[in-house]
Image: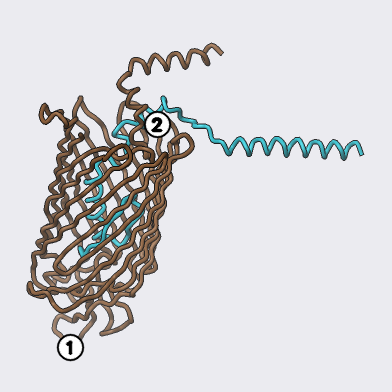
Amino acid sequence: MRAASKRRAALWALSVVLSGVGLSGCQVQPWVKPYEREHLADPIMSFDRNPIASGYLDHVFEVREGARGATGSVGGGCGCN
Amino acid sequence: MIRGRALPLRLLRQLQRRGRWLALVFALVAVGRADVLPEDRSDIMYHRYDGGGLIVQGPSVLIRKKIGDSVSVSYQYYEDFISSASIDVVTQASKYKEHRVQQNFGADYLHNNTLYSFGYISSIEPDYNSKTAFFNVSQSMFGDLTTLNFGYSQGWDVVGKVDKGIVQPFRADANRRNYNVGLSQVLTRNLLLGLNFETDESDGYLHSPYRSVRYVDPTVLRGYSYEPERYPDTRASNAASAQLKYYLPYHAALDGSYRFYSDTWGIVANTVRMDYTEPLFTSWTLDANARYYWQTHANFYSDLFPYFNSQNFLARDRELAQFHSITLGVGADWEFHPAWPHWIEKGTMNLDVQRMFIDYQDFRDVLYTQDPAGTEPLYTLDATVVQFFISFWY
């Protein structure tokens, strides 16, 4: 009996610990603080530094290749090919 | 413990020394955040594509302006002057000149951490009109480390036909629907991750009213004849991409991306791209990039069909052939601060040059008429793409 209750207590403690870990995971703490984002705010780190140029190059490739999409930009249709 | 206490003090001193940067950091531009509107900016561009007997050039203007604190509007005008003597044109038709105008209208509305974007794109050619409407929602979360966006666009195209400069009484419709989801994630203080997934559906008249396929015809001297191409009426595709951007310690950025694509026509494609950016002196930024692309051919593609009407769908469009291509590019930006007009904060002059090398693996150069049909050399294409543009921030 004593061994069984110890196992139950251990399972309960484990479930409490795991629940705590799980709940703490729901509230994500920013691991890169705002004052640590100096490098990320640099213009050279922009995914799309010159939208007019990247949009044009996407268009150049799209009309010559079978693949399209997943470039992060919206393209219109044309009869270019 | 001592080191643990000393670190914030040292960091604080560094930040105090970098007062200008601190302002920039807390302004929190870029990083793909959804709770800021795009910058007020205008670009004026000249673009030129020259390769394979095709020259496409023209101007483009992009204007973006905030209205109040929560709305930004944009307008883009884009023009193509096309002079074509490509291999398709010289072997199946005659040289032509054409003109295309595209206009984009867009608006962004910011509400708390959510950015709503919508717009309309119109493209007009003598034989092809296209209209596209799009809607996108971006949401910043987890302390602005994550930006998630969903988008939808729908297009309505009208295909026409022009023969010797005269518009023909031909009209066919094609429709496009596009769903996309994207994620921008701050991984470390130097590393960004971008993920994109996109699904496209098209239906209607999806081939060209001009293009033909060739088939073996022993009754003619050259050994082959042409018949019109014929595509399925529907096409669905999926594309997924991942992009990593890393800030190098000597003030430069390295960008690497990969895209996988597949569709119901049997095309599978892979794209790998690397980009390196480095500011130089106080006002220059240099960029170098390389891109590799490879695709398989569509199920119904052939350079030479065995006989007339040999299957229900027929294609000999280079875009649907098997090929791989390498693109190498360099670019330079020069930043300046004009004294007049006073409302312009800064400007940049930008030059970007790309060289494309495409090797087709099952599309043959039929201009080699001395070779028997089906044994001509494989076609290759080299092209130069130039963009020169001036940008203003205000």
State the image coordinates of residue B371 (x, y, percent, origin top left).
16, 73
State the image coordinates of residue B135 (x, y, percent, origin top left).
35, 54
Q: Nearer the viewer, residue A49 or B50?
A: A49
Query: Mark 2 against mark 1, which lies toward the viewer?
Result: 2
Q: Is residue B298 left or right of residue B94?
A: right
State the image coordinates of residue B377 (x, y, percent, origin top left).
20, 67
Q: Is B291 drawn above or below residue B18 in the view shown? A: below
Corner quadrant of residue A17? top right
- Residue found at x 24% / y 66%: B318
Chain ID of residue with mark 2 = B
Chain B appears what colour? brown
Corner quadrant of residue A16? top right
Which chain appears cyan?
Answer: A
| Callouts 2 and 1 in the same chain | yes
Q: Which residue is mark 2?
A: B190
Count of numbered badges drawn on the protein: 2
Q: Quadrant of the C terminus of chain B?
A: top left
The crowd level at tag 1 (other Cα within 10 Å; few <14, some 14-19, many 20+) is few
Q: Is A18 drawn above or below residue B219 in the view shown? A: above
Q: CA distance from mark 2 to mark 1?
A: 67 Å
Q: Quadrant of the N terminus of chain B?
A: top right
* Residue B156's disc number: none
Q: Is B111 drawn above or below residue B302 in the view shown? A: above
- Residue found at x 18% / y 36%: B392
The answer, for residue A69, to whether it is visible in the render is: yes
Q: Given the image, on which type of amino acid does mark 1 rest?
A: Thr
Q: Is residue B150 left or right of residue A50?
A: right
Q: Which residue is mark 1?
A: B219
Q: Given the image, on which type of amino acid does mark 2 rest?
A: Asn
Q: Secondary structure at mark 2?
A: loop
